[in-house]
């Protein structure tokens, strides 16, 4: 049996203010000495329990800090993705289906996200084509959120006009990034979403720029999602044969959205 000293030394009395010691028992750890000090308003409890509580608090703090760091990292990734505010919280479950074709496209987009590692290994792209207001951007945002939140990957959203402006910005003498850096930032993400393809009449600069981006990602085996209100035949003409060919490589997936706009239902 461990000997427990109930005597109060001069050092304990003068420096620590100890005025009493009592032998107590902890159901979990056995006998211990409870100390009463003039500096506290209650006797001390089991020191082993106190140590366990301290370790639990430290572990809890570590987990809370890790959770905060993870949340901040996700926020940074979502911010870097530049998904439009209207779509940043969109998910697959929020996509409302009223037809078999909508259900099929939803299932295909969900599968693309869930099996993205396989698609990435093949460099397989996805094209969401057809009428405006049919949920193409919604589904692309849901895919990007899955990659960022569930898989810890990077995804970037750009409209064609935004992408072109970003590239042109590198030509300004006061720009803090070069053309090479601009293209690299579009090639490096695990997924790039290019929206509003064909929204305006394409010129040579637009076709050349989009080819540089699409081809760079093609060579790096990184998938691209293209969103357009055009249908496949028209998209080929707008993008150009070379870009369209790169997107079609490795059995690229094309989903057609040919039903009426859902936006008309809320007007």
Image (tube, grey):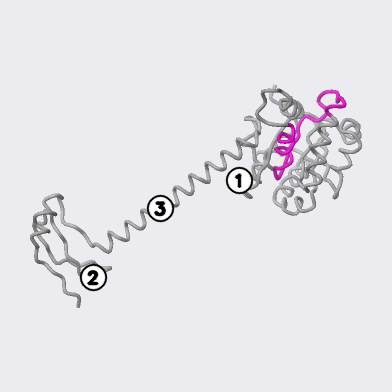
Element under disc 3? helix
Q: Are marks 2 and 1 in contact (CB under 8 Å)?
A: no
Element under disc 2? strand
Query: Viewer-proximal residue, 222 or 95?
Result: 222
Which residue is rendered at x = 16% and y = 74% of the image? 3
Q: Are marks 2 and 3 in contact (CB under 8 Å)?
A: no
The mark nearer the N terminus, 2 or 3, is: 2
Residue 35 position, x and y percent, is 15, 59
Q: Which stretch did the figure color magenta?
A: 179-206
Mark on residue 60?
A: 3
Position of 65 with respect to 189 (left or right) is left
Residue annotated with mark 1: 149
Query: Viewer-proximal residue, 87 or 38?
Result: 38
Between marks 2 and 3 in the image, the one whose residue lies nearer the viewer: 3
Element under disc 1? helix
Quadrant of the rendering where the N terminus is positioned = bottom left
């Amino acid at each position: 049996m461990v000997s427990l000293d109930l005597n109060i030394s001069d050092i304990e009395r003068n420096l620590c203010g100890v005025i009493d010691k009592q032998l107590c028992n902890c159901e979990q750890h056995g006998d211990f000495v409870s100390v009463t000090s003039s500096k506290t308003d209650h006797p001390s409890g089991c020191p082993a329990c106190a140590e366990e509580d301290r370790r639990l608090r430290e572990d809890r703090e570590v987990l809370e800090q890790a959770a905060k760091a993870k949340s901040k990292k996700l926020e940074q990734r979502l911010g870097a993705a530049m998904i439009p505010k209207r779509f940043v919280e969109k998910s697959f479950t929020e996509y409302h289906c009223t037809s078999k074709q909508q259900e099929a496209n939803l299932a295909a987009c969900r599968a693309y996200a869930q099996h993205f590692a396989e698609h990435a290994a093949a460099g397989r792209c996805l094209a969401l084509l057809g009428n405006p207001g049919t949920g193409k951007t919604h589904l692309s945002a849901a895919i990007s959120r899955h990659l960022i939140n569930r898989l810890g990957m990077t995804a970037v959203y750009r409209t064609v006009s935004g992408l072109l402006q970003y590239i042109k910005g590198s030509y300004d003498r006061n720009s803090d990034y070069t053309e090479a850096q601009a293209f690299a930032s579009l090639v490096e993400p695990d997924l790039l979403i290019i929206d509003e393809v064909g929204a305006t009449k394409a010129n040579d600069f637009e076709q050349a720029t989009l080819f540089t981006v699409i081809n760079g990602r093609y060579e790096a085996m990184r998938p691209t999602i293209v969103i357009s209100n055009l249908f496949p035949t028209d998209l080929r003409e707008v993008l150009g044969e070379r870009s369209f060919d790169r997107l079609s490589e490795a059995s690229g997936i094309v989903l057609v959205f040919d039903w009426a706009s859902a936006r008309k239902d809320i007007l």
